[in-house]
Amino acid sequence: MKKGLFAFLTTAPLLFLSGCESKLVVFDPQGPVARSITDLINWSLIWMLLVVVVVFGLFGYIVWKYRERKDNLDYEPPDEHGSTILEIIWTAIPILIVVALTIPTVKTLYALEEVPQGYEDKEPITIHVTSADWKWIFSYPEEGIETVNYVNIPADTPILFKLTSASTMQSFWVPALGGQKYTMGKMETEMYLIADHPGSYEGQNTNFNGRGYADMKFEVLAQTRAEYDKWVQEVKETAPKLTEEEYEELLKPTHLGRLTFSNTHLDWVNHADHNSKTYTHPELYRGHGYQGKIFEEEDNYRNKTNDDIEKHDHHEDTEHGGDHSGH
Amino acid sequence: MGIKWNEFFITGDPLILGSQIAIVLTMVGIVAGVTYLKKWKWLWSEWITTVDHKRIGIMYIISGVLMFFRGGMDGLLMKAQTSRPEMEFLDAQHYNEIFTTHGVIMILFMAMPMLIGIMNVVVPLQIGARDVAFPQLNALSFWLFFGGAMLFNISFVIGGSPDAGWTSYFPLAGKEFSPGIGNNYYAVALQIAGIGTLLSGINFVVTILKMRTKGMTLMKMPMFTWTSFIASVIIIAAFPIFTVALALMTFDRLYGAHFFTLSGGGLDMLWANLFWLWGHPEVYILVLPAFGIYSEIISTFSRKTLFGYKSMVLSILIIAFLSMVVWVHHFYTMGSGPAVNSIFSITTMAIAVPTGIKIFNWLFTMRKGRIKMTNAMLWSLAFVPCFIIGGVTGVMLGMGAADYQYHNTLFLVAHFHYTIIPGVVFAVFAALYYWWPKMFGFTLNEKIGRWHFWLFVIGFNATFMPMFFLGLDGAVRRSYTYSVESGFAPLFLVSAIGSVILALGFFAFCYNIYWSIRHADRNITGDPWNARTLEWATASPVQPYNFAKLPEVDGLDPFWKMKKNNEGLTIKDSDIEEIHMPSNSGLPFFMGVVFGVAGFFLVFEWHIAAAIAAIGIIAGLIYRSFDYDEGYHIPVDEIKETESKWRNVEGEVHNYVK
């Protein structure tokens, strides 16, 4: 029984890896960014398998050889306290392995911050990504268009994603094209992605953000340059304009399908801006259970500035909090 | 105030309704049972008011087993929900609450009390002391932990569970996105339990520094004592950070402050940093004592002294230091820049070096030994390969750039279960099989123990091994469902089946406890395993005063030497003197209750009621500062009687002579 477990433990990972390597998304990169990470992972796997094989082998050998049997009951183990040489060896070897892993890790970490090698002379396209509950908003400032829950990109072109969030901390991940990065309100993170070929790749949020988390997926559609340009032109000509009111509605915690607009919300708010208004709706997050007090926030977008107070009914100053939805 | 009772009790879910009924019935059952057996007085004077480190340890362990049951049920519900794609067993909200409570309960209310319980039972015995340095404080630690744990546990039937993950990341966990009071439970209950843990840490540092018996220098301490000592030091270093973070969270949620909020200039990254500045050392607080447990057991059942004692001590010191400087590896993806991520990649991977030293030292402790396959030893053996898998995947995750693809996926979830379950849960089982006779005077059944072992280990691997591959295929954590098209279904099903096997293993363990209480042989010696350290040099179960005469030590494995040289095993009438003992006290229990009640009101944001209840805390402190009880003395005759009873029996190496 013990042997069986042992065999399972040693062979299961190998079987899975060799059998599925071509299918698992992380091992099937579709762009140079993802490929550089996959190379690093493969490099680490070699070393880790070596560690596993050596230690499992040593473990199996020692346990089997020195197990108590009926014929060695009178064997009295020696009084042994250690061995400096051995201890130096098994300190030094892991240090060397760590060094062997550190060098490519650091190199990759720095490389991932730049336009990928070989693409330096290609003009990157900038796309602003705004995560909200529970949808992804993609704004193309140069093209002046905006999409929700899908993003079209030209293949073989570096895309600079500028990430921010209109709500909670979320994580932007397109595993086939590269690693992930957090989106956070009132700040901006950046990452480059490139798709080798036209194709459809799934992206999703990996950082838990409440009830709608599981459905926070989007499609990255890589097109040829010509197709992409045609699509941009089409959107500009046919898609409706997004108004500020519609946008405010859009940021409420809902699930939406795909939307397309021929302008961007960056015209009136960039959530990456540290002093931007806060678009939160605590009252819409009430679920079951006992409800606590909700606080008024001065920088909430619904607290209109002085000059448009007259547009609204006068209501008491809301220093003491309370439910906003009543107004 | 106007309590909304329909919000106060969670309604509308058959699973929760069932739990509510079960809780009420269990409580009625316990009260009726204790009353029928007329055990109230016994319960009060022998257990609730006790300051005996062994009994406090046992209460910690019982709480830990109960919490294991609760956390395990959460785990099974999650596995049932994800066993098939697009399953409609739990809705998203319910699933979110369950993985949150699963995480919090398993880490803070299962693993922590199990290990602190074992530390309580074993450390004073191993260093030849009669109790911890501050026995009443020790009881207070327990009751604060217990109060916090109970407060947290009622959340799912009263008021609503926290639902922002065990990491409780902001701004999600703030009022802007979680207006229900569920996350108040997190802030308040963990605060109360955390105070208890911090007090424990202080207590054990002082105990180990000041209470060691004659001759036991630091470098002659047993390895479990060493690891408990270092874990306690990390507790003192790390828990205050959590205390501060939770206090800030409380201000944000209860009083509208802006430490971590989206609006008003709050900084969500600050929470992540504070949380992991505590959270990462926390996992070493768990795993270091577990390493100590393995060291004791492997040495005992290999009949050899621990290989490379000095490098073992050095490596735990290095691990303790590194544990404080790796927290950023939990959020490489936050965009801190390549320089920061590089530094933390290096510190993270560096932990593999001292851990590797320990693994090889354990292997070489067994080499040339005579390995006796008891249940305690089997758990220690299974730990090695399972933990290696957790360790190598940990190194892979530690490589910042690679982590961009693993982060928040099931690969990560598989990794930390492969470290925490072999690293802590296996150790707890090993420790319970090993020290059970010391606590209760009988051993657990080895045969049922085998069922427990094989079911649990196989179930564990079947549950978590598939998750590595799911993660590499893009399956994210904390997602309550997945599509048919994703292709995740087969591996999720394997994992769900594995969790059932795992649960069967746990039930075999519970059955083993039941069977052994009923049927196990009570006629055992103080030293049933032919062990090496001082806790085995006294009776099983241990007398209230631990040692009639405090032992003297001049090296490692002192009890082994005593047996070998036949020294110090005999006690004479003239050796016995009166022993000074601390008195029992109801105050720690009272403090646990008022902390729990005040905390409950605070959770519901009933500030005036909370303030009134908090007066009880002040009153307890005042009462304690005027407490002049100096304890009592056990008379010589009573000690003589106790000692002569357990010595001189068949199979016992200890003698009693007039």
Image (cartoon, rainbow, N blue to C red):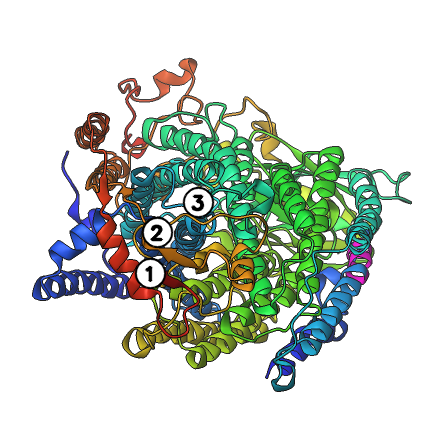
Q: How many marks?
A: 3
Q: CA distance from mark 2 to mark 1?
A: 34 Å
Boundaries of the magenta span: A37-46
Secondary structure beneath disc 1? Answer: helix
Q: CA distance from mark 3 to mark 1?
A: 38 Å
Q: Is residue B592 left or right of residue B403?
A: left
Secondary structure beneath disc 3? Answer: loop
Q: In the rendered image, which residue does mark 1 sit on? A: B66
Dot 2 crowding, Cα within 10 Å, few <14, some 14–19, many 20+: many
Q: In the rendered image, which residue does mark 2 sit on? A: B548
Q: Nearer the viewer, mark 3 or mark 1?
A: 1
Dot 1 crowding, Cα within 10 Å, few <14, some 14–19, many 20+: some
| Nearer to the camera, A300 or B592 | B592
Please name the amino acid that badge 2 sits on. Ala
Please name the amino acid that badge 1 sits on. Leu
Q: Is residue A178 above or below residue B492?
A: above
Q: Chain of mark 3?
A: A
Q: Chain of mark 1?
A: B
Residue B547 in picture, x, y percent from top left: 37, 52
The label number, if any, that marks residue B491 in the structure image:
none
Residue B168 shows up from this direction: yes
Q: Chain of mark 2?
A: B
Dot 3 crowding, Cα within 10 Å, few <14, some 14–19, many 20+: many
Q: Nearer the viewer, mark 2 or mark 1?
A: 2
Please name the amino acid that badge 3 sits on. Pro
